[in-house]
Amino acid sequence: RYIYEIGCAAQFFTPARSSLPARPASTQLLTKNAEERGLGVALPQGPLNLFEPSAYGPLLVNVNALRDYAVGEEVELSLGESQHVTASCNPEAHNNEEEEADRRIRAIIGQFTNANDHAVKARVILGRAGQWQVRWPHSETEIRDGKIIAELVLPPRSERSLRWTVEDPL
């Protein structure tokens, strides 16, 4: 299965008046290291070239730095950027300078776009665990590989706007 990974963490505490443009999501292939999936052997750390078949022969899709994967473990491989799934995540503009000065809590507006003809699952990276507290009201967040993440489904040919808050734990 595929999942689109969107990083929305770095710009939380930038000035609210600055707005970053939409960026492409990273396409990830998720599979299990199992024999029925064409694997089923220990995968050692090292480079991995991903190819896809074409009328002209195999085409190189991406080169990954693979970590060790044991048999039965979930494997994630990056396939590169998607031009069909994009996102922008920016601090909400404040009405006055006093609100702007209180930077401990920041509201974030995320614009997520899916130009595909089918629904996609997106994984939104909200920051590193312990970096700040996230209040993501749309679903549960979880910590995976030291990152705070949330997943959402984007309907086909849609644009979705979400608002959440982050708080500096200091």
Image: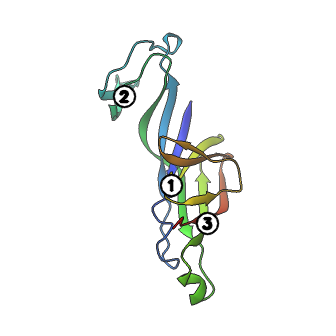
Q: Eyeballing the image, is 133 above or below 155?
A: below
Residue 25's spot in the image, x, y percent? 49, 49
**Spatial CA span between label 2 and label 3:** 35 Å
Residue 161's spot in the image, x, y percent? 66, 61
At x 66%, y 60%, the residue is 162
Q: Please rate how many residues cluster around mark 1, counting C-alpha atoms within 10 Å: few if below 14, some from 14 to 19, many from 20.
A: few
Would you name the residue on which mark 3 appears? 109
Tell me which amino acid carries mark 2: Leu
Q: Quadrant of residue 169?
A: bottom right
Mark 2 vs mark 3: in front: 3
Q: Eyeballing the image, is 166 above or below 74?
A: below
Question: Residue 117: in sight, yes or no?
Answer: no
Q: Earlier in the sequence, mark 3 or mark 1?
A: 3
Would you name the residue on which mark 2 appears? 50
In the image shown, does 71 or 24 lie closer to the viewer?
Answer: 71
User: Is disc 3 placed on a helix, strand or loop?
Assistant: strand
Mark 3 vs mark 1: in front: 1
Tell me which amino acid carries mark 3: Ile
Would you name the residue on which mark 1 appears? 130
Q: Please rate how many residues cluster around mark 2, counting C-alpha atoms within 10 Å: few if below 14, some from 14 to 19, many from 20.
A: some
Q: Residue furthest bottom?
A: 97
Q: Is residue 106 left or right of residue 131?
A: right
User: Is disc 2 placed on a helix, strand or loop?
Assistant: strand
Q: Earlier in the sequence, mark 2 or mark 1?
A: 2
Residue 129's spot in the image, x, y percent? 51, 51
User: Which mark is on residue 161?
Assistant: none
